[in-house]
Image (spheres, rainbow, N blue to C red):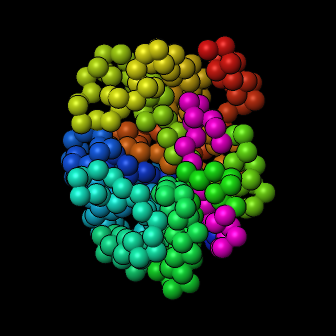
């Protein structure tokens, strides 16, 4: 699989990396429904076998459980991948998620993540969300201190806009940005991607398949069958009037992908990788088969006519 240099780091990362959002299991507000840990471990190992050389996780996924699953999956692995994780989202007393960017909290979080991941250093440590916004400077100052102390190799941000990145950059360089980016989420094309190009900030997009909706494996019936504990049941993109349009878009992506022996999901990912500012895409999977169905995106490049065909659909609908 192709690799690209991530921003100002020394890490050459595969153009698709494995995301663990869905592996946190139940018992937290953004759960994807039931998930068997043995399936999660097998899926991570399959992703590594297929050439992904980095894993993205977060302390909030399953309130720490996803990080523990990553550690279990990497036991006995001869060549460990780069490990990226995030801070600033913590469980509240009522079981909901609270946003904290205070220095003491981040210092505590990194120690917890190091323990759960069973590593001595985290390759990329990211601020998950820029909230509370008034604490960005305090939080980013602590992130820089953790880097200086050698607890993390590089520091990045997630879900930041340009103004927020400028505030952080005034304190210490940003190595990467992790934003939502897909055919259904294109806000960062307005200014964020250009800013990252100009400032040598790597971009690793998440949600590239729109939480699975653009994989070509969905129907109205399957959406209706989602468990109550799956957050997607309440997502507007999985409900009308958006659902029918999004399923039609997935059908187009499937048609284009089939010309090259690729799936709709691989086409959706390849579309994000077309942009020169995008270093790589985060892709998730709950079973080894799901990873096998999308890993080809790492080397799949759309032609300009195909990009134009997709754009014409988007503009028309």
Q: Main secondary structure of the magenta part?
A: loop
Residue at the farthest front position:
134
User: In the depicted view, which residue is nearer to us: 190 or 313?
Assistant: 190
User: In the depicted view, which residue is nearer to us: 9 or 267?
Assistant: 9
- Where is residue 116, by image quadrant? bottom left
Check the image and report above or below for 141 versus 223: below
Q: Is residue 239 left or right of residue 153?
A: left
User: In the depicted view, which residue is nearer to us: 208 or 132?
Assistant: 132
Quarter of the C terminus within the rendering: top right
Check the image and report above or below for 18 versus 267: below
- Where is residue 217, by image quadrant? top left
- Name the residue rendered at 43%, 16% in the picture: 240
Magenta stretch contains residue 169 = yes
Q: Give residue 69's position: percent from left, percent from top.
A: 28, 60
Magenta stretch contains residue 32 = no
User: Looking at the image, can residue 2 be seen?
Assistant: no
Q: Give residue 3's position: percent from left, percent from top.
A: 62, 57
Residue at the farthest right position:
198
- Name the residue rendered at 32%, 73% in the picture: 112
User: Looking at the image, can residue 292 be seen?
Assistant: yes
Q: Give residue 281's position: percent from left, percent from top.
A: 55, 47
Q: Give residue 151's position: percent from left, percent from top.
A: 46, 80
Check the image and report above or below for 25 versus 198: above
In the image, which residues are magenta? 167-188
């Amino acid at each position: 699989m192709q690799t690209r240099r991530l921003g100002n780091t020394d890490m050459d990362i595969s153009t698709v990396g494995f995301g663990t959002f869905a592996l946190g299991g139940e018992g937290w507000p953004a759960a994807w429904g039931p998930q068997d840990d043995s399936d999660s471990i097998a899926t991570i190992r399959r992703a590594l076998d297929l050439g992904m050389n980095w894993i993205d996780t977060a302390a909030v996924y399953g309130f720490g459980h996803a990080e523990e699953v990553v550690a279990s999956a990497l036991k006995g692995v001869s060549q460990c991948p780069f490990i990226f994780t995030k801070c600033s989202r913590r469980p509240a007393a009522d079981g909901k998620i609270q946003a904290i960017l205070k220095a003491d909290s981040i210092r505590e979080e990194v120690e917890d993540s190091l323990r759960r991941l069973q590593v001595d250093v985290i390759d990329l440590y990211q601020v998950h969300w820029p909230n509370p916004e008034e604490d960005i400077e305090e939080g980013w100052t602590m992130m820089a201190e953790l880097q200086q102390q050698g607890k993390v190799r590089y520091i990045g941000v997630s879900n930041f806009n340009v103004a927020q990145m400028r505030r952080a950059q005034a304190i210490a360089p940003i190595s990467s940005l992790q934003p939502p980016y897909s055919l259904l989420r294109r806000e960062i094309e307005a200014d964020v991607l250009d800013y990252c190009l100009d400032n040598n900030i790597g971009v690793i997009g998440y949600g590239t398949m729109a939480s699975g909706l653009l994989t070509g494996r969905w129907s109205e019936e399957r959406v209706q069958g989602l468990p109550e504990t799956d957050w997607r049941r309440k997502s507007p993109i999985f409900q009308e009037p958006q659902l029918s349009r999004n399923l039609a878009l997935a059908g187009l992506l499937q048609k284009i992908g089939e010309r090259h022996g690729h799936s709709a999901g691989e086409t959706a990912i390849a579309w994000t990788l077309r942009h020169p500012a995008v270093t790589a895409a985060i892709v998730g999977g709950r079973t080894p088969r799901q990873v096998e169905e999308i890993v080809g995106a790492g080397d799949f490049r759309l032609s300009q006519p195909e990009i134009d065909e997709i754009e014409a659909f988007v503009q028309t609908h």
